[in-house]
């Protein structure tokens, strides 16, 4: 780490004259081709401009679903290492990201950054797991997905559809018989009211009308944070509810795409990005601010997401489930109109941001990510990951090295350079490549295991006794969380 930093400073000391502001915009369930810079059908002019002025990362990986992806973003590790759960977290979960885990917010706070998380957290909803306990000075948002609330209050259906029967809702959710399933929270019809949290307070019980307002309110709060912290370095993590089911764009955007509610919400996301970038330009912060735009996983096909040209969608380890549209923007530092095929991932944000901010604490951390600032800054011969592992929950399902991807259980080999849609299995033609990838997989299994959460490299989950919903079914706010307990209608 020290040698890389020294090399970067020696080559371009002007790039590091001041610690850059950092903004990480994370969209929920956005498909690879849902935005026009990546071939989308609806015009997204703000993101077009962002890509034209910045870099497209065309081989950037998330995880198959929400919570694991966010764990990778926050810790720089493979999700299974720091959040060993079978799927995602639910309300009143007894487990979450361990408070002892070092997050990117904590790393940057060590370099005197102001930090804020505005949006969906989804790494545990108990007070011990929320953003303000994980390095963020401020938090405004919902603690888990927008579909994790009562059906009668808009969380189980789109606004243009009837409320589903309770029996239908009860079928959904993680099977409690799964390993760890019992402690990951309340599923289906048993879920409590959806809370909006503002720092240490539950300030709202989210119902259908409020769902429509979130993208706008998150954006306004983000702009406010930028304005209030323009005189010092800041880290803004902006994980939107958009465009996760149920699909609730603001009323001003409903019908605007002429295609679907999902695409309507994509248009509102584009507006939000424009507000952020325009604020940076207005305050003359653009030349010293790195902005990343990305998604937490591939888009769900059943909700109208478009993952072209990939096969598969959210929840799978096919490219369509894990490769996400990603743009890096930093005028004067990241080359305008550039793109990279380097294999990068959400695990890379912590070491990359920490390096750019010159955080000494990086030297003490163990993470799986890689500092990709040389890639972003266009350093000659900069590379991404030589090997990348595709985990789904506890299971190692695939491994990639260079253009080659091996699906382990199916024994299917694909050359992603010539067959991005994973259509032609060439396993019989390349036994040497298969053997090499299997060796990489066995090395990873020795560290993080496969089909079990018990492995040498897997860290302890955070765990609390007697977890409680932040809002009970009767509307009572959890005692002690608000200073004074109260009831929200």
Image (spheres, rainbow, N blue to C red):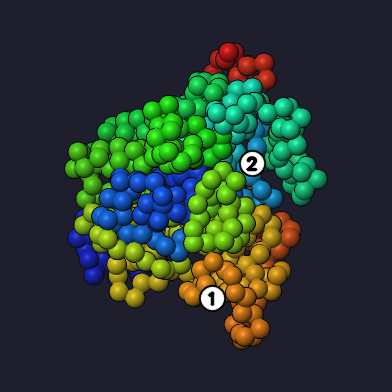
* Gap between marks 2 and 1 measured at Cα: 34 Å
Q: Secondary structure at mark 2?
A: loop
**x and y, in percent, of residue 267 in the image:** 39, 40
Compare residues 60 and 456 and report the one nearer the observer. Answer: 60
Does residue 380 appear in this view? yes
Q: Name the mark on residue 89.
A: 2
23 in relation to 467, above or below: below
Q: Residue at x 39, y 35 (%)?
A: 256
Q: Which one is earlier in the sequence, the residue at label 2 or at label 1?
A: 2
Q: Provide the residue designation for mark 1.
A: 415
**x and y, in percent, of residue 166 in the image:** 73, 27
Q: Name the mark on residue 323.
A: none
23 in relation to 388, above or below: above
Q: Residue furthest front?
A: 258
**x and y, in percent, of residue 114 in the image:** 35, 39
251 in relation to 441, above or below: above
Q: Residue at x 72, y 43 (%)?
A: 174
Splitting the image into 4 quarters, where does residue 228 fall?
top left
**x and y, in percent, of residue 33 in the image:** 45, 54
**Category of crowding for the residue at label 2, using alpha-carbon neighbours closer than 10 angstroms: few (below 14), some (14–19), many (at least 20):** many
* Left or right side of 425 for 179: right
Q: Residue furthest right?
A: 177
Q: Quadrant of the C terminus?
A: top right
Does residue 443 appear in this view? no
229 in relation to 80, above or below: above
């Amino acid at each position: 780490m020290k040698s890389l930093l020294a090399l970067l400073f020696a080559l371009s000391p002007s790039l590091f004259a001041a610690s850059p502001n950092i903004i990480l915009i994370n969209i929920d369930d956005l498909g690879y081709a849902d935005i026009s810079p990546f071939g989308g059908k609806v015009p997204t002019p703000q993101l077009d401009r962002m890509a034209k002025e910045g870099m497209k990362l065309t081989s950037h990986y998330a995880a198959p679903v929400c919570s694991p992806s966010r764990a990778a973003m926050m810790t720089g590790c493979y999700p299974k290492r720091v959040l060993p759960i079978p799927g995602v977290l639910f309300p009143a979960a007894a487990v979450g990201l361990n408070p002892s885990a070092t997050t990117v917010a904590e790393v940057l706070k060590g370099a005197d950054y102001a930090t804020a998380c505005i949006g969906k957290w989804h790494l545990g909803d108990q007070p011990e797991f929320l953003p303000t306990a994980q390095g963020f000075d401020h938090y405004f948002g919902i603690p888990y997905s927008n579909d994790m609330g009562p059906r009668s209050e808009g969380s189980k259906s789109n606004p243009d559809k009837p409320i589903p029967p309770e029996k239908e809702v009860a079928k959904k959710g993680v099977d409690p018989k799964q390993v760890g399933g019992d402690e990951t929270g309340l599923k289906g019809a048993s879920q409590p009211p959806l809370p909006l949290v503002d720092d240490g307070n539950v300030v709202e019980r989210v119902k259908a009308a409020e769902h429509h307002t979130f993208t706008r309110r998150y954006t306004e709060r983000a702009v406010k944070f930028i304005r209030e912290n323009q005189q010092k370095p800041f880290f803004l993590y902006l994980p939107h509810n958009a465009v996760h089911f149920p699909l609730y764009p603001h009323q001003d955007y409903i019908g605007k795409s002429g295609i679907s509610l999902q695409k309507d919400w994509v248009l509102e996301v584009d507006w939000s990005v424009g507000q952020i970038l325009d604020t940076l330009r207005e305050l003359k912060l653009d030349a010293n601010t790195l902005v990343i735009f990305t998604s937490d996983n591939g888009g769900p096909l059943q909700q109208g997401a478009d993952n072209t040209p990939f096969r598969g969608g959210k929840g799978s380890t096919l490219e369509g489930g894990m490769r996400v549209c990603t743009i890096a923007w930093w005028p004067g530092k990241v080359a305008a109109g550039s793109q990279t095929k380097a294999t990068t991932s959400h695990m890379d944000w912590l070491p990359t941001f920490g390096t750019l901010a010159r955080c000494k604490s990086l030297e003490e951390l163990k993470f799986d990510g890689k500092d990709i600032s040389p890639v972003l800054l266009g350093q000659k011969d900069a590379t991404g990951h030589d090997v990348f592992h595709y985990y789904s929950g506890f299971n190692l399902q695939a491994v990639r090295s260079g253009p080659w991807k091996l699906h382990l259980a199916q024994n299917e080999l694909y050359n992603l350079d010539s067959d991005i849609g994973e259509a032609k299995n060439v396993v019989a033609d390349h036994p040497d490549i298969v053997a090499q990838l299997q060796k990489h997989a066995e090395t990873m299994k020795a560290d993080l295991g496969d089909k079990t959460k018990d492995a040498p490299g897997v860290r302890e989950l955070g765990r609390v006794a007697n977890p409680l919903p932040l809002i009970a079914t009767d509307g009572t706010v959890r005692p002690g969380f608000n200073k004074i307990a109260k009831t929200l209608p």
